[in-house]
Image: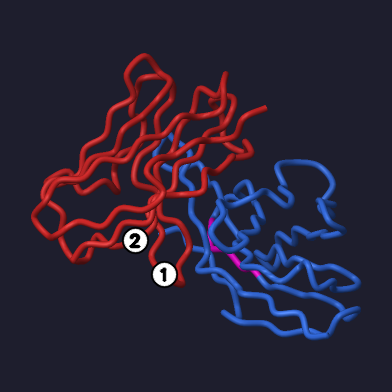
Amino acid sequence: EAGVVQSPRYKIIEKKQPVAFWCNPISGHNTLYWYLQNLGQGPELLIRYENEEAVDDSQLPKDRFSAERLKGVDSTLKIQPAELGDSAVYLCASSYGLAGGREQFFGPGTRLTVL
Amino acid sequence: AQSVTQLGSHVSVSEGALVLLRCNYSSSVPPYLFWYVQYPNQGLQLLLKYTTGATLVKGINGFEAEFKKSETSFHLTKPSAHMSDAAEYFCAVSPFVGGTYKYIFGTGTRLKVLA
């Protein structure tokens, strides 16, 4: 079974530029999560989708961050414009089922460096 | 606000010694509880989880954790450390708040195993 796929793995951009990250969850997983992980910290949830619906985006900085999950499968997270403080690892995870207590399967992450 | 505290950002043990990683949470209602492991440049992988039932939970690679409601703790243990256990470990909770499940990770504990 293929795991969660993320691309790109690494991205270096200059501040004020836009950037997008792509995630393909495990087949059949209806819940998808985007996390931000700063160096030496735990993941922080940005947004959670159940199928196509964003059910928790309370921690997403909506002035510059946006996300979409068309057709309830792949998802894209965008930052526009990027700031120096956005340098971090962006993790995507997926799980099966809609309730809490589900195991999340994580992708390897996209490491973003903003210069 | 819900929170997770991992005592000790770095823990060193000798190979063959007991591993004890501490996790305390704050929640008025016992949440779902998880331990994840992260190896360098990889995504997080579930070690074990507590949802309901038996408070002593066994996971992969010989790890186990005990949910103690009175102490709001979920400490992770392994009787005998192996070199391959060197990694970063994250405790996570999933409380039901405001009509939805939240996902909160601790700041992580980096385990070093000495030969």
Measuring 74% from the left and 50% from the top, which residue is drawn there? B48
Q: Mark 2 lies on which chain?
A: A
B50 on left or right of A15: right
Picture quadrant of residue A95: top right
**Mark 2 or 1, nearer chain start:** 1
- At x 67%, y 56%, the residue is B35
What residue sits right under mark 1 in the picture? A39
Left or right position of B112 against B97 = right
Residue B24's x, y, as percent? 61, 68
Give the number of marks.
Answer: 2
Q: Where is residue B99 in the image (x, y as percent from the top left)?
A: 42, 34
**Quarter of the figure that contains the C terminus of chain A:** bottom left
Taking the magenta stretch, the answer to whether it contains residue B112 is no
Q: Chain A is drawn in which colour?
A: red
User: Which residues, given as a range, are shown in magenta?
Assistant: B23-27
Q: Distance between the residues labelled 2 and 1?
A: 7 Å
Residue A72: percent from left, percent from top: 40, 18
**Same chain for marks 2 and 1?**
yes
Residue receiving disc 2: A88
Q: The blue chain is which one?
A: B
Residue at x 81%, y 42% (from the top left corner) = B53
Disc 1 residue crowd, few under 14, some 14–19, many 20+, Cα 10 Å: few
**Of B51 and B8, which appears nearest the observer?**
B8
Q: Main secondary structure of the magenta part?
A: strand
